[in-house]
Image (cartoon, helix red, strand yellow):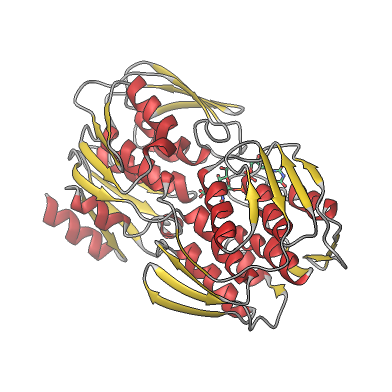
Amino acid sequence: MEQYVVKGGIPLVGEVEIGGAKNAALAILAAAVMTDETVVIENLPDVRDINVLLNALSGIGAVVERIDAHCVKINGSTINNLRVDYEYIKKIRASYYLLGALLGKYKRAEVALPGGCDIGSRPIDLHLKGFRALGSNVDILHGLIAAHADTLRGNHIYMDKVSVGATINIMMAAALAEGKTIIENAAKEPHVVDVANFLNSMGANVRGAGTDVIRVEGVEKLHKTTYSIIPDQIEAGTFMFAAAATKGDVTVKNVIPKHLEATTAKLLEIGCEVEEFDDAVRVVASKPLHHTSVTTLPYPGFPTDMQPQMAVVLAISEGTSTVTESIFENRFRYVDELSRMGASIKVESNIAIITGVQGYTGARVSAPDLRAGAALVIAALAAEGITIVDDIYYIERGYEGFEQKLESLGAQIEKVLSEKEIQKFTFKVS
Ligand code: EPZ
């Protein structure tokens, strides 16, 4: 199993380029098969989750042609199987977007029920409620969600909870339903807007994405398009917090600064300087950082996907901070690992109470999930001495060339496969 070995204590300095948004791309790839014409998707991140979904698309018969690492051509006219097996869904939950896409296009789909997840229980009741409201039968049989409808008809759907996945899934199915669908209490995340823009570029009629009421006027069919995915706000935020934790000076390029407002606000609050440009932000951490409180919320609130990275910075900032996780119940699994690096954090229910310490010391830690894994790497970059991060498989699900990008900012980090390689690295950097 691959690991990262990191020699910490070096301020990150320089410029880093952000890739396409993984969570927008996952939905857009699924939606791409909703037309029989060829769709070209650009600015695709070359990360594991994307590659698994592309395999799932080939698995149901779509033609997937990789033009290069960041561009793919997809044709869904050859789909010959409307069942997406557990093999894919167990690797990435987002294969459930194929339910909305296939149900919209073929009025029928069978997708394995996603299993439990490492950040907490992740129900999909709202997705199913939406499909039923559109007139689909939905049964759970032999571990599969089986949805079928004679006709999908638009409806007025109120989401009991703000859900990114359910909003997108319902929007996709509604795009090819008869008549008008109104989704109330919709998620407003930038990737919801990106999926709506993508659908519209294929001829759909989706209005209001980015507000809490989305209106979809169903169309008969969709057509070809070429579409470029928005930048990944979570990858960008991860580098912003890495700059803060290492007392660095990093310009994060190819971003939409508006999408980063919650992150920027928190960095300013704790004492960083943040400069915004048209498509870049610069984070400078030259003064001592101090405590704050943060609560994760749906967009435009502070993202749950950035919570561990923020906590890593607060744990080495002066004073007592609190981090409240309001979206997923099991997103503090990195706390014990961080404590092994010297952090002082107590978790009570969904609140982490963090008492700032002087700094981290290197240790051997394990990535418990994608974002927490990235956060542990940030801690390693700030730590005195050597840190080994195990289970970096998780990090590779969502960060392209993470170690290369960090290296280009001056970090001493290497991906290794054995104890011998760890020793070699340690010898080299000492
Ligand atoms: C998306 O997950 C992202 N995944 C997650 O990113 C992200 O953490 C999350 O949104 C919140 O922003 C993808 O886009 C592939 P939700 P999703 O439905 O859509 C509850 C990462 O690290 N809920 O918005 O599954 C749910 O339990 C990942 O990149 C229901 O109750 O999240 C949660 O409390 C991890 N019933 C809340 O809603 C449902 O049917 C929000 O979840 C659906 C959700």
> Where is residue 15 shown, x and y percent of the image?
21, 46
Q: Who's the residue at 32% across and 66% down the image? A: 417
Quadrant housing residue 405: bottom left
Q: Nearer the viewer, residue 168 or 226?
A: 226
Image vertical order of residue 411 relative to residue 284, above or below: below
Q: Position of residue 84 (x, y in %)?
A: 68, 72
Residue in the image at 68% along x and 72% along y: 85
* Left or right placement of residue 306 versus residue 213 in this view: left
* Near-viewer residue (182 or 428): 182
Residue 146, given in percent of the width and then of the height, sits at 81, 66
In percent of the image, x 43 and y 57: which residue is there? 391
Total numbered labels placed on residues in the image: 0
Q: Is residue 314 visible?
A: no
Q: Residue at coordinates 77% horizontally, 60% vertically from top-left?
A: 177
Occupied quadrant, residue 241? top left
Q: In the rendered view, tell whether residue 391 sits above or below residue 222.
A: above
78 relative position to 9: left or right = right
When the figure is inspected, residue 32 is found, relative to residue 339, above or below; the finding is below
**In the displayed structure, would residue 276 be above or below residue 181?**
above
If the image is split into quadrants, where does the N terminus sit? bottom left
Q: Is residue 367 visible?
A: yes
Residue placed most toward the observer, 230 or 412: 230
Say whether residue 152 is left or right of residue 114: right
